[in-house]
Image (cartoon, grey):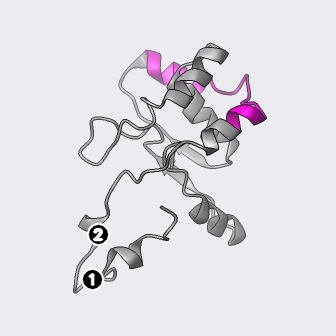
């Protein structure tokens, strides 16, 4: 889950069933085989970041925090680790949230690696919730 793949249906299901969502790679995992640059290169997030004097990563992490999910981040860069923590002394405005909600959505994975004729999930329709 991230601003470029918000997974609203999944989050609503989890909320209705008392499930706490944990998100791994909330910045899109750019550079990973299964990752995308949709978060860090988002024009919307860049505009919000500039207006707040924050980084795109901080805006994305703050958005996730405000969604009430558990955020799992990773970095080997000490400066980025500190930056990831500097999301608690400010908030996104209602206007910011409207802009983020309008970001075009795209999955980070096509899901084909999870499909197997002999496995639990036999088709993409069984895997995805139809949201995008």
Placement of 132 over or under 54, stated as above or below: below
Residue 35 placed where, x, y %?
32, 44
Question: In the image as oriented, which residue stretches furthest toward the right?
Answer: 94
| Quadrant hosting residue 100 | top right
Residue 41 placed where, x, y %?
42, 29
| Quadrant hosting residue 59 | top right
Task: Evaluate if marks 2 and 1 touch, with contact meaning CB atoms under 8 Å apart.
Answer: yes
Q: Secondary structure at mark 2?
A: helix
Residue 49 lies left or right of residue 41; in this view the side is right
In the image, which residues are magenta?
79-97
Residue indicated by mark 2: 114
Distance between the alpha carbons at the discs numbered 2 and 1? 9 Å
Instruction: Count all numbered tags in the image, as a single digit.
Output: 2
Question: Residue shown at 55%/42% (left/top)?
Answer: 103
Residue indicated by mark 1: 119
Whichever of callouts 2 and 1 sits on the residue coming sooner in the sequence is 2
Q: Secondary structure at mark 1?
A: loop
Q: Nearer the viewer, residue 17 or 38?
A: 38
Q: Check residue 88 for magenta coloring.
A: yes
Question: Residue shown at 53%/20% (left/top)?
Answer: 55
Question: Residue shown at 47%/37% (left/top)?
Answer: 73
Q: Mark number for residue 8?
A: none
| Quadrant hosting residue 45 | top right
Determine crowd level at label 2: few under 14, some 14-19, many 20+ residues with C-alpha closer than 10 A: some
Residue 128 placed where, x, y %?
43, 70
Determine crowd level at label 1: few under 14, some 14-19, many 20+ residues with C-alpha closer than 10 A: few
Placement of 126 over or under 80, stated as above or below: below
Placement of 99 over or under 47, stated as above or below: below
Question: Residue shown at 63%/69% (left/top)?
Answer: 13
């Amino acid at each position: 889950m991230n601003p470029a793949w918000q997974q609203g249906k999944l989050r609503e299901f989890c909320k209705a069933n008392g499930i706490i969502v944990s998100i791994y790679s909330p910045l899109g995992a750019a550079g990973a085989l299964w990752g995308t640059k949709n978060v860090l290169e988002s024009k919307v997030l860049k505009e919000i970041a500039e207006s707040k004097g924050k980084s795109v990563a901080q805006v994305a992490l703050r958005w996730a925090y405000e969604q009430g999910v558990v955020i799992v981040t990773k970095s080997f860069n000490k400066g980025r680790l500190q930056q990831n923590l500097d999301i608690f002394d400010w908030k996104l405005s209602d206007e910011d949230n409207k802009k983020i909600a309008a970001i075009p959505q795209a999955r980070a994975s096509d899901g084909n690696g999870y499909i197997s004729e002999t496995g639990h999930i036999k088709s993409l329709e069984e895997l995805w919730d139809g949201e995008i």
